[in-house]
Every structure is written in C-alpha cells, then in structure tokens.
Amino acid sequence: MKSSSRPEDLDGKSAYASAGVDISLADRVKRAVAQQVRSTYRPEVLGSGCFGGMFQLKQYEDPVLVSSVDGVGTKLKIASLLDKHDTVGADIVNHCVNDIFCCGAEPLFFLDYIAMGRLKPKHVEAIVSGIVQACREVDCSLIGGETAEMPGMYSDNDYDLVGFIVGVVERRNIIDGSNIVPGDVILGLPSSGLHTNGYSLVRKVFNVDANPSCLNKIYPEPGKTLGEELLHVHRCYYPQLRPVLPLVKGLAHITGGGFEGNIPRVLPHGLGARVDKGSWSVPPIFRLIQETGEVEETEMYRVFNMGMGMTIVCSPQQVAGIAIVLPEARTIGEITEAEGEQRVTFG
C-alpha cells in the first residue's frame, strides 16, 4: 500500500528541517558565497561542480603533488565566544600553505570542511571570507568544500573547521633536508602569536569556558585584550620565503609539538639541533600564559612556537643572502650530531 503521508510536520517544515537540517538554507548560503569563491580561481581551474573540483596541471616538467590536511583546533572556541569568525578562516589556509611549503611546494587549490550543530549563514560567510582572502594572497584556488549541519553532534554555537590543500613542486626542487650537515645554521622567522596551537591549555589557564569575560580583559603586555591577542591570524610565510628557496636546505613549521616535535622532521638520521632560547625575545603573550598557569618552561616550548613560527636550515655561507631578503630572520641555533634520543637541545 502506497503511503499518503508527506515529509512535512505540522508547521509546514520538511521532516529533515524538523530534525535540525535545513537543506534550503544550506543552498542559500552556498549561493551567497559562490562569487567570493570564484574570485580565487586560477586559470587552471576547469570548474567546481559535478561532485568534484577540477584543476589542470600546466607548464611543469616533472611535477610532484604535495597535500596536507589540518584543523584550527580549539581556537574555534575563542572565535565563537567573541563572535568573530573571519580570522579562523585565514588561519586554516595559512597553516596548510606553510605545511606544504616546507617541501618547497607552490599552493594550487584548497578545500574546506565546516561542520555546525545549526547552520548560521553569517558565521559561514565570515569563515569563507577569511578563507577567500587568504587564498587570494597566495594565488590558491578555493575549488570546493562541504558545509555540514550536524544537530546532536555539535551544540548550536559550536563548529569545526578543517582545510585540505594540494600544491606542486618540480621533483628536482623538493626540499627534504637530505643535504643538511652538522654546522648548518638554523634561522627563525617570528610568529604572529600562538598561531593555531596550544589553545586547550590556554583555555584552561585562563578558565575561559567558565569565565568568557576574561577575553575582554586588557593586559599591560601585550597591551590589548586577551581575546584580540588570541585571535591573531596564523602567519603565512610563503610570500616572503619563496624568493630564497634556492638558498634553503630545510624548513620546519613550528606547530603542535613545538621545536622538539617539528625540527627533527626535516633532519637526516643521526642529526639534531641546538636551539638558543636567548637568541630572540619571547612575546609577552607566552610569558603571560606561563606565569598565569604556572606552566613549566620545558612544557611551554613543547606546546607553543614561543614567538618563532618557521625555522630555516641553511649553510653558514647563505645566511647573509637570506638576511637581505628576510631582514627579520635571526640565527637561533645550529645543526649538530644527535645526542642519543634527544634530537633537539636548548642552550
């Protein structure tokens, strides 16, 4: 017997909308951001649709694709509490670009995944605006994404944000650290703050979840509200570093795990790194976190970038050439023989 029931409730909503998922609203949001997304397209984009984005590789002799995926983490909690969502969109792009650039790759295209308990168009549009702006700045095409409404999985004000990136590098130009030797120099480039790591610890230190008003407190150092400081956009190093790639032996993006968790990823077996903590001034936000939470300094350097977001390994002869292009780069250490299991030591 054929059912005569209709997929609507008594209020005229579809059954799916009554369950918490509004397909019509999702379609309107997609249409609202479509023009922004198209503004990022490079000539190689053949289209975004047909269940997949299409990108044609051109003008490469021996191309190697480099991909990465990452999230913004619980920095999203800070964004939600302050109702500011564009910066996290830029965060995820810049983080992913930095990661693949450590191999020498040029960013080609990007995809995003946004999951929410309840679809909020203004939030989605703000997030996408940040993604679009960051993509434009590195000539990376935003060719696809997914916005998922997941009631019961997330609360109404919670969401998750993940980014997927694909870049390309000529095989002969891959940076893999294989030619790094003892005596090579480690240069550091300043971060713009915490970037996208350590926010679970920060939220605990300042008791943010129970007392969100702390985000509006102004501290003498850094001289702005805690919330403003915590939402600084993750710095993208690609535009500045790209011109000096021929002088570089290795790049390490200092993210989760700090120096100890990231520098060894670019070092040949048997080599380590000595980092001189006194070679740069640690920004006030990190000292504030350490003192407020009574966090051991060793843990601070394992969790945070401590003011250095990217490290460059080069021969001593190339330091001057890199400094001409990157005057903010400073020598923060050197490559050594590994000392047992300890591959990063601090001086």
Image (tube, rainbow, N blue to C red):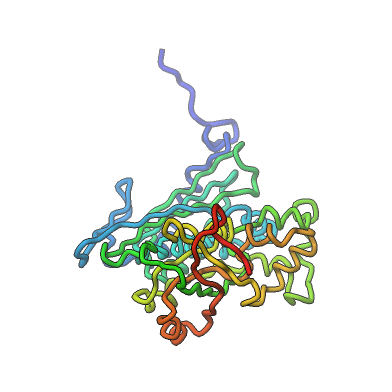
Residue 345: quadrant of the picture: bottom right
Q: Residue at x 38, y 78 (%)?
A: 244
x then y, percent, for residue 147: 48, 48
Q: Is residue 107 left or right of residue 73?
A: left
Judged from this view, the residue extending furthest toward the top is 1
Q: Residue at x 45, y 52 (%)?
A: 69
x then y, percent, for residue 200: 67, 53
Q: Residue at x 56, y 67 (%)?
A: 274
Q: Is residue 101 left or right of residue 228?
A: left
Q: Is residue 115 left or right of residue 287?
A: left
x then y, percent, for residue 73: 59, 53
The C terminus lies in quadrant: bottom right
The N terminus lies in quadrant: top left
Viewer-proximal residue, 313 or 113? Answer: 313
x then y, percent, for residue 248: 39, 73
Q: Is residue 186 left or right of residue 153?
A: left
Residue 128 showing in the rendered view: no
Residue 344: quadrant of the picture: bottom right
Viewer-proximal residue, 234 or 64? Answer: 64
Asked if 167 appears above or below 276 in the picture, the reply is above
Asked if 293 appears above or below 224 in the picture, the reply is above
Viewer-proximal residue, 320 or 191? Answer: 320
